[in-house]
Image (spheres, rainbow, N blue to C red):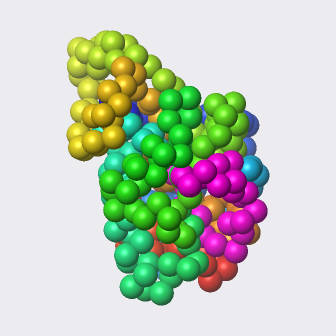
Amino acid sequence: MRTGTYLLSIVLAAAIIAMAFVGGYWYAQHRSAARDAIPILGNAPAYTLTNQLGKTVSSTSFRGKVQLVTFLSPYCTGYCPLIALNLASLEKALEAGGLAGQVQFVAFDVDPEHTGPSAMAAFLQQYGWDPNGPHWQFLTGSPEAIRTVVTKGFFIDYEQVSEEQQDAEAEEARRQGRYVPEPEVANPLADQAKPDYAVIHNDALVIVDPKGRLRVVYDEASRVSNAELLATISQLAAGG
């Protein structure tokens, strides 16, 4: 299955929040070497969900840490594995810089109807993460609970489509000259499951500060550099 071939528009609850998120992205891409103050975009949502080990996890347990929040599907063979691989590399950089204990990686399963903790744990392990380790929480719940947190709390949209629908959309994009192929990444879990659908969603990375506030949104999580993330994490961990 391929996800992220087409990035869906970020769903925003109000014009003020829309402006804040656009401003946050611009800031993340263009702020100066002086590391000016990072704007506060709002509060991250509160929730209680289930992680890759089948354990109940509350958002309150992440207070005091910088959260790197992303949105993944265990059967993805495109952007999701790339994001997981990139963040595994970032974890090593954080450990080398003495920052690992101040960071929590959080992902939401955008395919809760078909996958669960066992698939989520297998996905993490495939791309360099220890499912039992302390740094990553891959979260799932009922489809309704996940949609509420992801779309209304983090303003990220996602949609399940059939392979036929995805292929038709790709062909239409080719005709219009706007087709951008996504990378193909091996995913043995998907090869085994052989899903006949895709989950398309924003390729986004949201950074939440230690007080639980939304601070930065990157709309190309698979491409953001470790250097940029390390600088932002360091600033937020220091209270910036």
118 or 58, which lies in front? 118
Please provide the residue range marked out in magenta: 49-71
Q: Is residue 153 visible?
A: yes
User: Residue 184, image x and y in percent?
Assistant: 23, 40
How many marks are shown on the rendered structure? 0
Q: Relative to 121, is 82 on the left or the right?
A: left
Query: Please, is residue 50 above or below residue 40 in the view?
Result: above
Left or right: residue 26 versus residue 163 is right
Residue 234 position in % (x across, y down): 53, 79
Q: Is residue 239 magenta?
A: no
Residue 23 visible to the viewer: no
Left or right of 78? Residue 154 is right
Residue at 68 percent of width and 66 percent of height: 62
**In the image, residue 237 above or below residue 52:** below
The stretch drawn in magenta includes residue 56: yes
Residue 84 rendering spot, x and y as whole percentages:
39, 55
Quadrant of residue 181 in the image? top left
In this view, 142 is above or below 96 = above
**Which residue is at 30% across, 34% downward?**
192
**Residue at x-position 54% and y-position 52%:** 52
Residue 3 coordinates in the image, percent (x, y) = 38, 34
Task: Give the quadrant of the C terminus.
Answer: bottom right
Quadrant assignment for the N terminus:
top left
